[in-house]
Image (cartoon, rainbow, N blue to C red):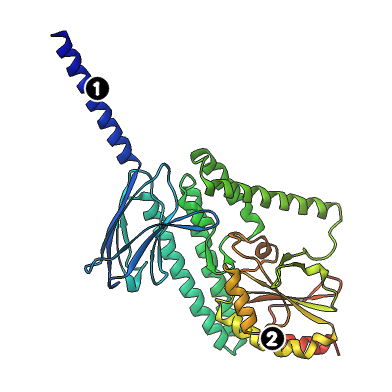
Amino acid sequence: MIFRIQMKMMNKVALLCCLLFFTACNQNKVSITGKIDNAGEAVLHLDEVDVYNTVPLDSVVLKPNGKFSFTFAADMPGFYQLRLSTGKVIVLFPKPGEDIVVETDANKLYPALKISGSHDTEQITKLIILLNQTTARLDSISKLYTQATDDTLKSSLNKEYQEVLEAHRRASMAYILTHSNSLSSLYAIYQQYFPGNYVFYKTSDIQFFKILSDSLSKYYPESHHVAALKANSKKMLSDYQTMVLMESAGQVEGLPDIALPATNGDTVSLRSLNDKYILLSFWSMTNQQCVTENLQLKNVYKQFSSKGFEIYQVSFDQSADAWLKAVRFDELPWVSVINEGNQNSMVAGTYNVNQLPANYLIDNTRQTIVGKNLSPAQLQDKLNELLR
């Protein structure tokens, strides 16, 4: 009798252990199901976005009705993405145990996107949609500005452009401050309007990096993303404090230096150039206006390079291989360097680069900027005046 009672108790304990085990497994499981219309039988990939690279986790062929399903184990909240074979991505910030439902149209990915089951993903989706709307407006204003000939109209368009930038900047600040305990804020603080054109780039933005770094370190001390943010924040603060110290001691000599890898793999610094005038240029191969300007700059360079003129051109492209091919294909003859994969470029922040293309014409003292954001025609006129 006692033996039977003991056996029943042992069976109950074993059953309870099994239930606890399966409950724990379910708590660490993330499921992503949904439907993507008008994608055909495309391949949909699930990737984990790590600090410096993207790791493929799984892939499925969409069913004829567009439905799909993924399930994976996650010990902590993370940064993931659904990626269509066309390259379009849907950003996800799931937590362990969440069942996420995604519905959209392949032709209108984010405007048609509906997400449920993950609060952080739902919130960042709203900001991404706002960013897409902002970049569309900026692109429209830029096209009108390029076509405009009237100075009054250009001034009005420039003012509108800055207002659009500031509106999105304020919305992003609000997001970070109200979601400082969410990993999705990492996406918010590293947003780009266009490649190399960051939402947060000003010296005053260090405070937001510090606030977010301190907050996320408490909630997610083991996250690689948080560790990278913390290191980046410390470096930004250290660089700023060094700059202030040097300025107060009167030790700053000339404009801040830039030292980046060139096409041959060697690091080339701005200060290593000894020419009379240097055009410090910022661009991206993905920006058509930059590409068009480069082809025009080749004529200016050909005319003045033998007279003491050089171009030091910084690329903000994410792929060094693609950048190198573009430089060689267009046969760009000047010094080309790349600021590859830097999520918050100190170079862009230091030189206040908030749109591409951008440039500064610097004299041989490296202390004076004699021209800013000059078109190839304006640069030619300026050099004719300076190097006559």
In front: label 2 or label 1: 1
**Disc 2 marks which amino acid?**
Leu
Say few, some or many: other residues with alpha carbon within 10 Å of mark 1 (under 14 / 14 to 19 / 20 or more): few
* Disc with the residue nearer the chain's start (2 vs 1): 1
Residue shown at 37%/62% (left/top)?
Answer: 45
Q: Is residue 305 above or below residue 368?
A: below
Residue shown at 57%/46% (left/top)?
Answer: 227
Q: Is residue 279 above or below residue 50?
A: below
Residue 113: x and y in percent read: 33, 64
Question: To which quarter of the image does residue 343 belong?
Answer: bottom right
Residue 332: x and y in percent read: 68, 82
Q: Is residue 357 above or below residue 63?
A: below
Q: Secondary structure at mark 2?
A: helix
Total residue callouts: 2
- The foreground one among 145 and 80 is 80
Residue 229: x and y in percent read: 58, 50
Q: Which residue is mark 2?
A: 297
Residue shown at 61%/55% (left/top)?
Answer: 205
Q: CA distance from mark 2 to mark 1?
A: 78 Å
Q: Is residue 165 left or right of residue 310?
A: left
Q: Going by the picture, which residue comes out furthest to the front?
A: 3
Q: Going by the picture, which residue comes out furthest to the left?
A: 1
Q: Secondary structure at mark 1?
A: helix
- The foreground one among 24 and 180 is 24
Q: Is residue 352 above or below residue 150?
A: above
Q: Which residue is mark 1?
A: 13
